[in-house]
Image (cartoon, grey):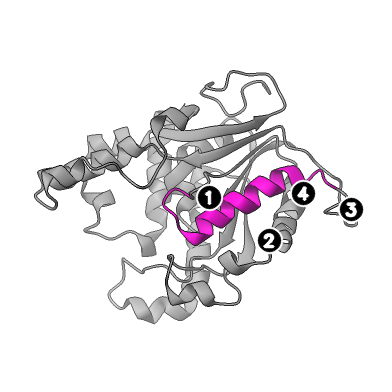
Amino acid sequence: MPGLLAFHAHPDDESLSMGGTLARYAAAGEQVAVVVATRGEAGEILNHEEPESLRERLGEIREAETRAAGALLGVTAVEFLGYRDSGMAGTPENGHPECFCRADFLEAVGRLVRLVRRYRPEVMTAYDPFGGYGHPDHIQVHRVGTAAFFGAADVGRFPVEQGEEAWQPAKLYWVTWPRERTRQRRRLAAEAGEIPAEEAEVEPDSGTMEEHISTFVDVAPWFDRKWAAILAHRTQIAETGWLLTIPEEVRRRAFSREAFIRVFSRVASPEDAPDLFAGLR
């Protein structure tokens, strides 16, 4: 049954970046598969009195949180690609032999190709070329996800395995977020006296310039599901963090519109159509 396959780097990325889109299409009866490259082993632990007591089991805990979030969103399947979290750029975790950013490129693409051929999606998502904010794993999701979109049909580079058939998804989108969201967050910080007012207006170095975003999906009807899924990632939600402290109306406005860049489409449809399945349904 064709549908959507969304490729992400770490637990919680799926809910924060496009949880409303996942919920929307799941509610519409589409098959929705979420593939996560790592289990977030190197991330901060933000909601526990003794955070380091969880470190040994963190991958297992965050996998469970991701599956719980997926259930809240109604997704069909959650898969893990089997790599280790690489940590932020320039940290010692970048050197771990099993981390995603050090993975052999064709091997990593091949792992994702297997899943694309299993779920046979019409639509795939990966990340923009900068991975949103430059995290090594996010950049690798861009590279591997984009290559797997084309590689799933390439039996020369990725020969079919037993019981498998080549598959070509119809549409590829890169998920991103507009820089205006970053500006809005900084302006709130300036109003609270946390940063100087002039710093709030400096051009952000993360997210995508608005003129490069082709597609906005209104997910306001699914905001509550998305927010519940975000909160399911308990080890990553700080009680005093900005996600929980921004005003409710600002939170809804900021997270009720999800942004994508349409990269490739084998069907005719407007580039800015507010529906990833435009031209397919």
x 57%, y 56%: residue: 140
What residue is disc 3 on? 163
What residue is disc 1 on? 70
x 53%, y 76%: residue: 95
The secondary structure that most of the magenta stretch takes on is helix
Q: For the residues carrying marks 2 and 3, which lies nearer the camera in this image? A: 2
Residue 267 lies in quadrant = top right
Instruction: Work out whether residue 24 can be spotted.
Output: no
- The three-letter amino acid code for the residue at tag 3 is Gly
The single residue placed furthest to the right in the displayed view is 162
Image location of residue 83, percent across then percent down: 61, 67
Q: Residues within 10 Å of mark 2 (few under 14, many from 20)?
A: some
* Magenta region: 131-154
- The three-letter amino acid code for the residue at tag 4 is Arg
In the depicted structure, whether residue 133 falls above or below residue 61:
above
- The foreground one among 227 and 129 is 129
- The foreground one among 42 and 250 is 42
